[in-house]
Amino acid sequence: MTPGLPTANNTNITGWRGVTLLQQRLERETWIFRRQDSGDADFGIDAEIEIVRQNKVTGRLFKGQIKSSDTVEWKDSEASVSVKVATYNLWREMPLLTVLFLIDIHSGGIYWTPALAHHPASGRASMSIKFELGSDIRNDIGPLAAYLDSWFSLRGPEGVLQEVPQFHQIFRELWSDVDHYDDPLEMHDEEHDRLRLFYQYMLRLRLDLGFRNEEIPALADWYARDAAAWQGSGILSWATFSELMKFTRPYYEAAIARLTGRLESLPLAAENFWAKNLLAKLQGRTTTFSVMDPKMNDRTFQRGFEAKLRSAGVVKYPHFDGSRS
């Protein structure tokens, strides 16, 4: 062999093998695995993974940080690895979910944990990430898939849209308070909290519908104005509240108008029933559409669900305890 050639150390080789094992496992599920490691640099992200279901690309993306070991050492069914707090800060700032994987090269075990399930101690430069022995996805990816489905359903655009009726009602109630109270007085705590929730939701809804928000002041800017104009101390005055609502109403109503137009164009089909119900609520109609969930008549599902309630000690009326056929 020619002397002076580059060499790969054992850590490099172990890392590459770990990434390959995870890639092969996820590609068995037909998920798309894109390597994003940067040679020897470790910036906290090794892969981007896209979920595919029934040969359909879902657009559901998450990031993967992969740690590999020749043999993982377990204590009380837990293993831990150390990461820099700077890496954790990167995960926290990323708009996509990050999942951490620990690969045991010898056994082939693949363990996972959500990145933000962990938190660094104050003033420390590194932190410990713990993996559970039962999180191995070699043979069953179900728990990871269920976690991802839950995360995307709550954080994705569909989750935002399904909350529109509740926030639309909050908007109406807040609007009824515009110019209603003495201007210098502070808002009531409950209305103030609801305003903050609605404002952030309105911004998110607009982004999900393709609007730009640079013309809308950040919520913190309204507090800065209130402090200068009314010596506010953390709760907006009714005067600033009324200004805020009058300013943002056209932006909010533009989002609702665009959403309504999109919902009207959807065909009446089983997969769209929730959207049609949302449209009815926005238009003040009582018409509802429903689709029977097959789990209603699935006794295996019903027994399993009731068993979960029984283990928590909360079953009020047992219907599927095995005593009935």
Image: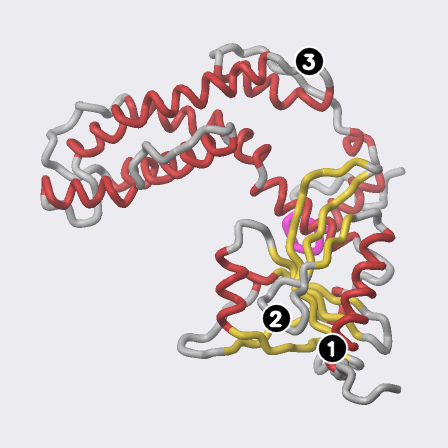
Callout 3 touching callout 1 (CB < 8 Å): no
**Which residue is rendered at x = 20% and y = 40% of the image?**
236
Residue beneath disc 2: 42
In this orientation, which residue lies closer to the viewer: 200 or 195?
200
User: Mark 1: which amino acid?
Assistant: Asn
User: With 317 as the anchor, is 117 left or right in this view?
Assistant: left
N-term-proximal mark, 3 vs 1: 1
Q: Amino acid at mark 2?
A: Asp
Residue 267 marker: 3
Image coordinates for residue 128, horizontal then vertical, percent = 57, 76
Q: Is residue 3 above or below residue 142?
A: below
Mark 1 is surrounded, within 10 Å at the Cα level, by few (under 14), some (14 to 19) or many (20 or more) other residues, namely some
Give the image location of residue 96, x and y in percent.
58, 50
Q: Position of residue 49 (x, y in %)?
A: 71, 52
> Which tag, 3 or 2, sits closer to the chain's start?
2
Residue at point 34% right, 21% down? 250
Q: Nearer the viewer, residue 197 or 89?
A: 89
Q: Are discs 3 and 2 less than 8 Å apart at CB?
A: no
- Residue range in magenta is 308-314
Numbered disc 1: secondary structure: helix
